[in-house]
Amino acid sequence: MALITYRDALNQALREEMQRDDRVFLMGEEVAVYQGAYKVSKGLLQEFGEMRVVDTPITELGFAGVGVGSAMVGLRPIVEFMTWNFALLALDQVINAAAKMLYMSGGQYNIPIVFRGPNGAALQLAAQHSQAWESWLAHIPGLKVVTPGTPADAKGLLKSAIRDDNPVVVLEGEMLYNTRGEVPDGEHVVPIGVADLKREGDHATIVTSGKMVLVAMQAADALAKEDIRVDVVDLRTVRPMDVAAIAASVKKTNRAVVLEEGWELAGIGAQVVDYIQRECFDDLDAPVLRVHQADTPMPYAKNLERAAKPDAAKTIAAVKRVMYRGD
Amino acid sequence: MATKVVMEALSPTMEEGRLVRWLKPEGASVANGETLAEVETDKAIMELVARGDGVLRRQLVAEGATAPVGTLLGVIAAANEDIAALVGGATPVSASAAPTAQSPAPAVAPAPAAVAPVSTPATVAPVTTTAPEHETAASDGGRVRSSPLARRLAAERGLDLHAIAGSGPNGRVVKRDLDATAAPAAAAVTSVPVAAAVPVRAGTEYTDIALTQIRRTIARRLAESIGPVPTFYLTAELDVERVSEMRKAMAELGDDYKVSVNDIVLKATATALAQHPEVNAHWLGDRIRQFARVHLGVAVAIDEGLITPVVFDADTKRLRDIAREVRELATRAKARRLKAEEYTGSTFSVSNLGMFGIDQFTAIINPPEAGILAIGAIEAKPVVVGESVVVRRRMRVTMSCDHRVIDGATGAKFLATLRRLIENPLLLVY
């Protein structure tokens, strides 16, 4: 166990999986010579050579397609998008090729591919580069979508994603790369589709994932000072979702707040609320509330950006409302 | 500012309530939220609370009386305040049933539709003066707002959500409101006798039991379900080995001592009825009449159909009197020579088709009686006694019960007593 950054945890996962299986290779913009736009692929070119760590042109649709093709013929590609904002250009390959190939080929071609990169807002990157795509990607049958919020989960989930025989989308976070946490050395695999109770309390449940796990933990710390103890359910995977873990917590606390980075309408939180109302109807003591980004393109101005983002203060207010405390 | 005390809808289906008892006398100081009275709804006994501060100046409804929701029950006002305008329009409501009365007319005075508080606004106060956020949902007369969890917990704990002030938005009842409600309504029910049942005493002809709300609801719902007399049936197989022995032994003493099994069954039934007045009863629509005396109707088949002459005070008559009387009544019945008073006035009936070889059957209740016992044939059959199979004489009896009067357990207890008597016939002379 070592205290390392999220970035290094991803790097460990890539290195260990490339050592473990020589069919695994990495490609993307600036992944090789530049060692990665966020240094996630640091040292990999030196260790594995340019056949397995491949710099691509700035052609997201093109190299995503190369990845899908290589997966069809037996390789296990990891496609890095410099950010998921750029991956919009590649979505035809992600959604129409990778996600549907197994189905449309009648089971002849499975696509063991990983699409990964930072998701959501960082700081003042403005409307086009500050978007959280979980709900877009999780909408698609044929894709698995993982959203690690801690270094340990980043390593464990990336390893599971690489070993999975189907397309897995890994949503990382620019603001997460420098966060530190305890990460087991060597073999540490987090199964896809299993949530994690990051914090235990009995007054309310915060369901969240990805970057918002940190926000939820901040909120939980602040609430604890007011003697409000919350469960923080980290989904870790948003497709397939661990409904049992959500239900178990909500049945215990009887009230829930769903916290997500993206927009409200058709967001991941909407799906979580749907599961809760179906599974926990008779256990609910309050309507389930959601905390999410304001329904607007992300403002560039620092003060407006802060106002638009979901944060600990908004989460705390929502928890108090589901507990009928203050308003 | 005067505050009206009205019959509140304390359950979702409540249309009227019975004021079980006042907990505050006239002249007592009361505070908003304090319990004024106990009201029996169609579900349970609930507490009626004051909706304002002051003195309970008047009680307009007597204990035991039933009043529709909205009826003015009393007035809370300052000690010296003029409440004439409020009270003037109200008609006092008295108790509807007088126990052990000969023929009490139901005296539920219809409440005035509106106690018009038009002329003197100074004396008119809203019924509810609490803040809307903490209003009990009951006071808006309709649906109670509550969280799904609160509804589930209320059901589990036997609490009526209507009686709980909701602290959530718009008066929503939430979990903490239930947690704050200590005493469940069920406890209230057990602590207060539901029916003011007066034990049967010597000298009284019968006891009228005022219908409790739950009894009223049972009566209405069951009648809707199955027809005018919501009947259910209880069958028991009785061992008549000893009855047969006794009858045989008596016959050996000579013709004067001959009795039929039917006579013994009648004697046993009458004895059991005397011990179970709740079964020896009539349904009178607005009340149940439990009889202190047992007048046993005995169904007799005649050419034209069926008639049921009555053995009056059958429980006090000796077996030989019953035997002789039944024989005599049956003979005259077949000759159509019965007088009207000889076939009316039964409190319970027995019908026997055993002599026709019928093993078991259900008899139709003769209203307003609440039950009838159908006697089947005696049959020798293998019965397990201890560890061995032996041949015993057995007889099946089926009791038809009017569910408005008799509940399953009530009927079963009566049959248990009957079984004890039939299977130990010496008890009939004890």
Image: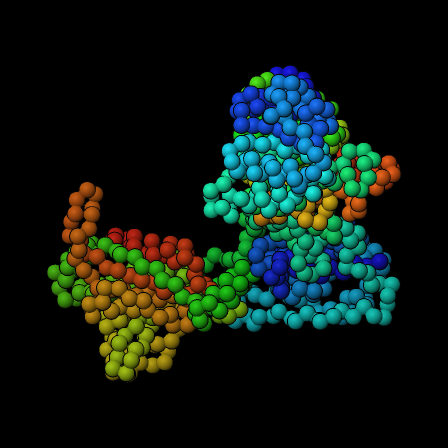
Q: Residue at x 58, y 48 (%)?
A: A278
Left or right relative to A106: residue B120: right
Left or right relative to B132: residue B47: left
Residue A219 % position (x, y): 74, 32
Query: Which of these two is toward me, B144 or A58?
Result: A58
Q: Residue at x 73, y 26 (%)?
A: A38
Quadrant of residue B179 within the rendered picture? top right
Query: Which of these two is toward me, A138 or B297?
Result: A138
> What quarter of the picture does the C terminus of chain A occupy?
top right
Colour scheme: rainbow
Q: Is residue A181 visible?
A: no
Q: Residue at x 59, y 66 (%)?
A: B96
> What quarter of the picture does the N terminus of chain A occupy?
top right
Quadrant of residue A98 within the rendered picture? top right
Image: A152 above or below B404: above
Q: Residue at x 56, y 65 (%)?
A: B98
Image: B15 above or below A203: below
Q: Is residue B129 visible?
A: yes
Residue B185 % position (x, y): 59, 49
